[in-house]
Each structure stands twice: as C-alpha cells, then as structure tokens.
Image (cartoon, coloured by chain):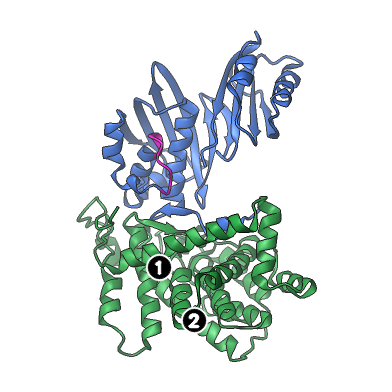
Amino acid sequence: MVSLFDILGPVMVGPSSSHTAGACRLGLMARAILGGTPERARIQLHGSFAATGEGHGTHRAIVGGLIGLAPDDLRLRQAYDEAAEAGLEWEFETIDLGEDAHPNTAIFNLERAGERVRVRGASIGGGRIEVHEIDGFTVSLGGDYHTLVVQANDEPGTIATIAGIFAKDGVNLATMRVDRTGRHKDALMTIEADEPISDKALTEIRSYPWLHWARRIEKIS
Amino acid sequence: MHKSIESLLRDAEESGRSLPEVVLAMEVAESGRTEEEIRERLRQTLGIMRAAIDEGLKGEVRSPSGLTGGRSARLWHDGPRLLGPRVTATLARAIATLEVNAAMGLIVAAPTAGAAGVLPAILISAGEYMEKDDDALLDAMLVAGGVGGVIAQRASLAGAEGGCQAETGSAAAMGAAAVCWLGGGTNQQVATSIALALQGLLGLICDPIGGLVEIPCIYRNASAAMQAIAAAEMALAGLDFPIPADEVIDVMDEVGRRLPAAYRETAQGGLAATPTARRLVQIQPSRHPTGISV
C-alpha cells in the first residue's frame, strides 16, 4: 500500500534514498538486532554499495545508523566523529557476494559486551530495507514492526504457546513466519507485531525449555 | 490511494468533494491518522522544503565530490535575462534543493531524492506569485501526492527501474497538477496538466556522472520544473491533450521497461559514459560535504 508520505517523503539527509537513507536504516536495524550501540563493527559492502557508496555518504550513513542516528538526523554528516565519541570502532571491507545478491547489500559483524551478531541486509529502494539473515538464519525483516525472532526446538505447540503469550499481553500480531532451514534443524520464528513486546512477555517466552534464544528487535522508524 | 487519475476524478465528482479532500480522506482511511495530524505533517514537510531551498540559495553548500554547489545562488542573483523573474526563481529553487541534497543536507524525497527539487520549487514560486497561503499549498501538496500515488502504482518512481522520466517526469506531473489546482484549474484541467507534463519528459534516461545524484540531476530538476509550469499554464488556458493522463503514465511505464540497463542509474551509459565524465570522477577534491548550517 502506498502512503501519502511515501510519495511526499521520506524527509532525509541526502543524497540518495537507497544509498543514504536506506543505508542508515540498515545500520539502525543491525543495532536494534544487537540490542544497542556496538563497541566494534566490521561492515562488508557488496555491489553498488561498495562501488558508489563513498560519493553517496553510504559509509557515514551506516556508521550513523549503528550509533542510533535516524535518516533525517543532520549529524549523519559528522557520523564518524559522533561514532568515535560513542565508543564505536568500525572498519569497512568490500565483498563480492555474487550475481544473485542484491546490489545494495551489507553484512554487519557486530560486537557488544561480549555478545556477537552477524546481520546481512539490503537497501531495496526508496529508503526501504530488508534484513535477510541473522547469524546464519534466513529471515525477512523490514524494521517497520516490533519484532521477535525466536530460535527453538522444532516441536509441536511452540507457535501456539508464543501466540498465546502475545494475546495475553494484548499485542496484535501483524505477520508470523517459521523457517526450518537453519542450523541444528531448529525452527526460527519471526513475529512482527503492531505494539512493542513487553519485558514480561519476553521473560515468559524465554522461560520455556524448548527455547534456545529469543531476540526482541524494536521498530526502527 | 487511487490507482488511476480517472478514478481519482470520478471519486471527486461522485462525492462532491475537491481533489485535495479526496486524497486526504483516503489517507485518513488507510493510515488511521486524523485529518489534522496529516495536515500538520504536511505543514512540517513544507517547512523542510522551504528550509532546503533557503540553504541552497545561500550558495555555500558543496558536495563531497565537488561536482555541485553554488550554482543556484549564481542564477538567483544573476538572472533573469531571458525569462520572467518567476521562472528564473523556480529554476534556481529547483537547483538549490538538489545542491543541498548532494551536500548531505535535509530534503524531502518527493517523490525521490533525485527529483526532490521540482515540486518545492514550483509550489513555492507559484504560491508566492499567486499570493496563496500555506493552507492552499498544503491542498496543492495533497493533489501532488495523489498523482504520485497513481504513478507509483501504475508505473515506477525509481530511476533504476524507469530512468529519469520516472523521477523528474513523475515530479513534474505531480508539480503540474499541484500548481494547476492552485491556479484554479478544473479537475479535468488538472488531469490534462499531468498528461502535458509527462508527455514532454517521456524517454528521459538516468545517466548520472559517477553514479552520483548531481550532474545532470540538478539541471534535470530545473528543466522538469519548467516543463511542469508550462504544462499547468497550457492546461489552465484550456488546451487539451488527446491521450488521457493514465495512458500517458502507462506509456512511461512501457518506455521504462524497454530502456536498456545502461540508461537506468547504472552510470554505464549516456552522459555518465562520456570521456569527460570518466575523467571527472577520478578527481575528488574533497571527501567531506561543506556549507550546510546545522
């Protein structure tokens, strides 16, 4: 569905909705998946991101997103200084992911308080993004919803249990996706919700023995 | 949002509402926001459009590549020589926004960052000349948004998909409709202005030097703004165009699909592939944007 403010917007720091605004949102999303500003970040850029990123402020926008700056934040222009102040150490690399990868793909290797995460995503046009992979698991996240990603034993009843916890919490589910192609033959559930996911719901979900990990990802904008 | 200009006009006719009212009502229904919230956000959007123009016209901004910055101010202070002052001001304003965009300033991507100069330039220039208040400009923005919504659904707004016609062509169609409405045009005249604006930009390729949103983009925004004013002027005078707006939009889609990839924002063809362009992208005087006052 096209919204009026998709046409008369977004309001953004230039020069490119895909290479600047989208790049920033990818950084924001990677940060949200990690659960905070990373201490260390190694970012690999593929295709057009690698080729024309410098002239589009792509690197700056990504670094800005990693420290929590939004696409319309003018501090993106000084993102390197801001990031240094925020205690982020970062490095960029060029990577060739082959013909099939989206031309504006980035891979984030992030570290924070001993925790590591690897996120792969692409800027798919008009500032919109898609995260394709978290720690080797295939996902499809756009950052438009409050999201819960759950890795659990692939056994009956897990989906119903989680849906029940959300219902009890008054959270309306927008989309739900289950993926079993990940490692350990576990199930990966991606649940997108209209409302924020509460600490209580997260704690309850985490208390089940069939659960390996659950990651709450805040809506980014 | 409506999927055709025809249904947008029919909706207005059947409900007895104006075009801005139709677009606003639809946005209320689809977004769940109130009319007041939507108008307030439009007001903020208009404020950002104005601020970008003012910033660019100061003449201080420079892009990291060094390819753009300072031209809008030169035209603003040096012109007009051949055109009326309104048109020259419109051209300068269109370039100003794109210069700010290239220097990592704040802009409204309406409908895209690469075509962000067109709508604000003609909206503000025409509003100034016709002495319209901001509420009238917000109505005109709603008309522009409705037109952009149709194009987004029938064709494309992305240069990588449809070439520059999809970006500055769409912006010109939106802008023409906006100022035609502002100038007191009938709904049919608004529809005609869309067709007239777009027909003149059909087939325009996207061939930016170095793949950057700079040259020829700043000038394409200026010429698209001029095309939009001309289209609105002709429509308001009662000139017709035999092909309806929806069919012209469909032609833009068809042409976009048939454009070779070299002409769709890849910097592999057109102006981007000239020997001079290739030399220019080797020279990068600065890696940092300058001149935006934060």
Give the amino acid at mark 2.
Ile
Judge by depth and name the residue closer to the eye, A27 or A207: A207
Closer to the camera in the image, A56 or B31: B31
- Please say if A152 is above or below B177: above
Labelled pair 2, 1 in contact (Cβ < 8 Å): no
Please tell me whether mark 2 or mark 1 is closer to you in this view.
2
Find the distance from the CA under tag 2 to the CA under tag 1.
27 Å
Could you say where residue A130 lies in the image, as x and y percent from the top left?
Answer: 54, 40
Quarter of the rendering occupied by the N terminus of chain B: bottom right
Number of residues whose C-alpha sits closer than 10 Å to that of mark 1, classed few (under 14), some (14–19) or many (20 or more) = some
In the image: residue A140, left or right of residue A127? right
| Residue drawn where x is 39% and y is 22% of the image | A111
Q: Residues within 10 Å of mark 2 (few under 14, many from 20)?
A: many
Sequence order check, earlier mark of 2 and 1: 2
The residue range painted magenta reads A65-72
Displayed quadrant of residue B226: bottom left
Q: Main secondary structure of the magenta part?
A: loop
Q: Position of residue A86 (x, y in %)?
A: 31, 31
Residue that badge 1 annotates: B270
Q: Residue at x 34, y 59 (%)?
A: B102
Residue A203: x %, y % from top left: 60, 15
Residue A68, label in figure:
none
Residue A79, picture quadrant: top left
Q: Which residue is mark 2?
A: B229
Query: Does residue A125 show up magenta in the picture?
Result: no
Is residue A195 something one can see in this rendering? yes
Question: Looking at the colours in the rendered structure, which chain would you say is drawn in green?
Answer: B
| Amino acid type, mark 1 | Gly
Q: In blue, which chain? A: A
Q: At x 25% / y 81%, what residue is drawn?
A: B78
